[in-house]
Amino acid sequence: MHFGIRCTRCDATTTERHRSRCAACGGTLGFTYERPRCWPAGASRMWDHAELLPIPPDVEPVTLGEGGTPLVAAAGMRGARVFWKNEGANPTGSQKDRAISVAMTHARSIGAARIAVASTGSVGLACAAYSAKARLPCLILMPRGTPAERLTPMLAFGATVVAVDATFEAIETLLRSLDDSWFQASTIAALSPYQAEGPKTIAYEIVAQLDAAPDWMVVPVGGGGTLAGIWRGFEDLHRLGRIQRLPRMVGVQTRTFNALELAMARGLRTMDELASIAADERLETIARNLKHGVPPDATGALRALRDSGGCAISVDEAAIRAWHSRLAAEEGILAEPSSAAAPAGIDTLLARGVIAPGERVVALITGSGLREPSALPRGEPIAMPGSLDAADLDRLVPRRGPPTSNRETS
Ligand SMILES: [Zn+2]
């Protein structure tokens, strides 16, 4: 096999693929890989990187064509060379498709009989779609009151969606009581290590698309697993000789849910230390995917920030709203509000002089705004009488001036 399974705490190795934790110490499992025979070039798909994923070569992937997402040069960001890695182009519109494609492939290969997950968002939607593709029954638990726009697509995929009159915490406890016939499709590395390898392929694709690592990799942080996974992807490429230098990682959070920023400032590392600074999850934010008192994969995310010489910053609601609009109106990218934290964060770091003009910056656009229409910037059409004529329309839409190009080229 092209990969080994190794405990990240005690270094014990195993070949038992059905385990999700170290049998010796209960630690989180990780993986080691041989150097791949070749590096896919250009906008490769996720499974083009199968040699760096923890799935045996004779296992057929459960795939909907995830990955291979566009890397698009930004039109204008204070003269910086910013690129959008648009994960909204994935099959269910978010970066979680990578993790869940790996999880579902793993689940089916170890003989899982059914899938269970607690999620009102991207993970639930991805699980519903990939379970349908894998022909595995899927149970999605969520608190009562979850908006219909999030539920309806899951139902369309044929998932059993249960709205429970309980908190998310109580639902998680219920999930832990299920027997082994259920595969729990969590995207927390400590609970489900195989899926955590999926986000690494974002780094592989960026390097193939830029033919180098960027100077900065900016990621909105919800659970922290995507940031941690992308960093491990860059580490793989560095260790295996594909790139000579590593990017600096930036985690962007909201002002309220900024545990990583506080942890970096105060030198906190463990989940116990982080618990003391957890924000109240009843507080609201438009960036709902970033709403974690403590990101469940905070330790991996903090390691990525520290080892890369990067930083964590937070941005306020107004900046997120403004960039949510600007991404659509100025960049042509309809993102979910959480994704707008990335350009808001870059803007802040450019203003502070942390990111220098001329440095190459990749911002992760985590998901498509098409899945969250109620969060889109409000607007009304202009009401006109049926007697309107060409002159009316002429007045409504200004003409573009002579072309001036500030478009960045790589
Ligand atoms: Zn161990």
Image (tube, rainbow, N blue to C red):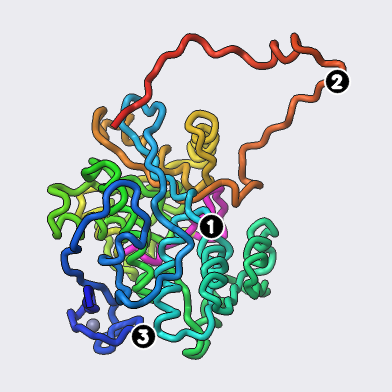
Name the residue rendered at 16%, 64% in the picture: 35
Mark 2, residue position: 385
Is 356 above or below relative to 188? Answer: above
Instruction: Kindly identify which residue carries mark 1.
Output: 92
Magenta: main secondary structure equals loop
Q: Residues within 10 Å of mark 1 (few under 14, many from 20)?
A: many
**Where residue 346 sits: x, y (%)?**
36, 37
Q: Is residue 35 above or below residue 351?
A: below
Residues marked 1 and 2 touching at CB (< 8 Å):
no
Of the numbered discs 2 and 3, the one sitting upstream in the chain is 3
Residue at which label 3 appears: 18
Report the front residue among 68 and 25.
68
* Badge 3 element: loop
* Label 1: element kind: loop
The answer to whether marks 2 and 3 mark residues whose Cβ atoms lie closer than 8 Å is no
Which of the marked residues, 1 or 3, is nearer the chain's N terminus? Answer: 3
Vertical placement of residue 224 versus 389, above or below: below
Quarter occupied by residue 156: bottom right
Q: Counting other residues with Cα less than 10 Å from the Cα at mark 2, is it few (<14), some (14-19), or many (20 or more)?
A: few
Horizontal placement of 369 versus 206: left or right?
right
Q: Residue at x 36, y 70 (%)?
A: 189
Q: Quadrant of the C terminus?
A: top left
Q: Is residue 109 magenta?
A: no
